[in-house]
Image (tube, rainbow, N blue to C red):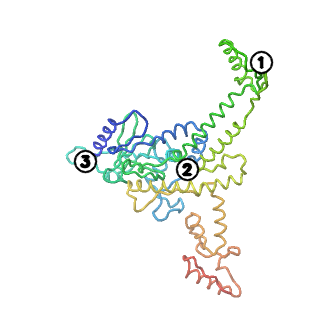
Amino acid sequence: MPNIFSQLGSIVQSWFSRQQTSQVRIFTSSTTEVYPDINQTTAITKGFNSNTAVYSIVKKAAKKFGAVPRYVEPKGQEGKSASETIEGPLMDLLDQPNELQGQDAFYSIVYAFYKVCGESFIWLNRGDTAALGEDGSYYDISDEEQSRKPVLEMFVIPANRMIVVPDPGNIFGVFGYILESSVRIAIRKVDIIHWKDINLNFDVVTKAHLRGWSALASGYKTLEANNSATDMTVRMNQNGGAKMVLAEKSLTASRNAVQQSQLEKVFAEKINNVDVKGAVIGMQGDWNGIDLGMTSVDMETLKGKEFSMQELCFLLGVPYEFFDSQVTYANKAEAQKGWIVNEIMPDAKQLDGEMSRVLCKSFGMEKTATICSDFDDLPELQEDKKTQIEWLTKGPFTVNEVRQATGYEDSTEEGADEILLPSGLSKLADLSGDGGDQLVNDLYANNGANRGNGKEKVPQN
């Protein structure tokens, strides 16, 4: 049986010998590794680490994503109540991925890398990677055997430190991964959950399509514009010396080097000095006044910074309304709900699918269970649930049908499976009087014959 770690080790050694000291991405026809895109590191260093807008946007998104709980539920019954979840080792792993992090903190980091770098890597610690043979010696187990070993812990690996090793026999396949740290560590492909964003850069040579695509790579110019505008704002505030200087009317005066140096020193002390901000100074001689207040260029710089902030919000999928003080509370609440439905929920379900594909198999539950996010407790969606319950209780539905639609388990109370009428939500069996029995019989018959097909008949008088 081929030794996967020996093969990965030789690839690492080959890569190391070819590695350039430059940070520029270089690909040749013989290159077999997909290097981390330089924009991933740039997105972290110039984006999240040093840009106020990117940090605020990503942090808000990551904290909300981390607040979505995950459960193991029976396959085909997604969206049921928490009482129908499957307890056990997989559920325990989701609750606490490792001994250093809880569920919220773990998924916040996963999402932060996904947003900034366009991909996120989760390492699955399965314990020993070898098995004991009949002769008492250890041998490497296959990827299939490894994929079925229970996962003990999960850790997030920095996306900009990961190298993807393509499968030479499959342009869409991955042979393994390399963690580029102080030492280079080979990792099996089955021990990594690689969650990546959409990437349209298909290349059969570089295999760039095996990596995710960072939104900040597309918006790199916007990021640079925001950083430049911030730098200009800082300089504008720091150079807040005199608002006016008296300039010499005649430009014919001649000065030697010493005099010029002394004049520049006076300017430095009396003008380029935050301690005299807003002051008006005078200088010896025949001078004109020059206003040093905010120019139209300064005003445009501030507007440009606001516009680039909006573009960064668009790039990273967070509504700009959150950061605009002019937006009303009602509009912010509506934007918050739309953000949850159109951004957080699709991303959470996508990660659920990736985790179900790998983790359910490792616990022997790939045919019976799936991992699902639960959005019911998010405050932004509570108003929608209230509206749904009000609509359902207008009937004709049973109590248990209402409970099922809103995510609760069936009630065992008497009458929970009897149809309710909209008028006061009375039970059909309680109706009495002339024609009451016939109405009950007709409504039961019509609902019984058509229930579930969405075409319930309306009884005629």
Which residue corresponds to the image point at 66% horizontal and 11% vertical from the top-left?
258
Q: Does 42 sit left or right of 150 as displayed?
A: right
Which disc is residue 2 wearing?
3
Q: Does 172 sit left or right of 335 as displayed?
A: left
Q: Does 217 sit left or right of 190 as displayed?
A: right
Q: Hey, what amino acid is under mark 1? A: Met
27 over 445 or under it: above or below: above
Q: Secondary structure at mark 3?
A: loop
Q: Indicate the position of residue 215 as horizontal and vertical percent values.
A: 53, 47
Quadrant in which residue 260 is drawn:
top right
Which residue corresponds to the image point at 36% horizontal and 44% vertical from the top-left?
33
Quadrant in which residue 364 is drawn:
bottom left
Q: Which residue is mark 2?
A: 65
Q: Secondary structure at mark 1?
A: loop
Which residue corresponds to the image point at 60% horizontal and 76% vertical from the top-left?
418
For the residue pair 241 and 65, the one nearer the viewer reads as 241
- Whether tag 1 and tag 2 are in contact, CB under 8 A, the answer is no
For the residue pair 16 and 144, the one nearer the viewer reads as 16
Distance CA(mark 3)–CA(mark 1): 84 Å
Distance CA(mark 2)–CA(mark 3): 41 Å
* Earlier residue among tags 3 and 1: 3
Q: Indicate the position of residue 272 as horizontal and vertical percent values.
A: 69, 23
Task: Spot the residue most to the left.
Answer: 135
Q: Which residue is mark 1?
A: 283
Q: Indicate the position of residue 237 as horizontal and vertical percent values.
A: 69, 31
- Whether tag 2 and tag 3 are in contact, CB under 8 A, the answer is no
Which disc is residue 186 wearing?
none
Q: Indicate the position of residue 426 as horizontal and vertical percent values.
A: 68, 75
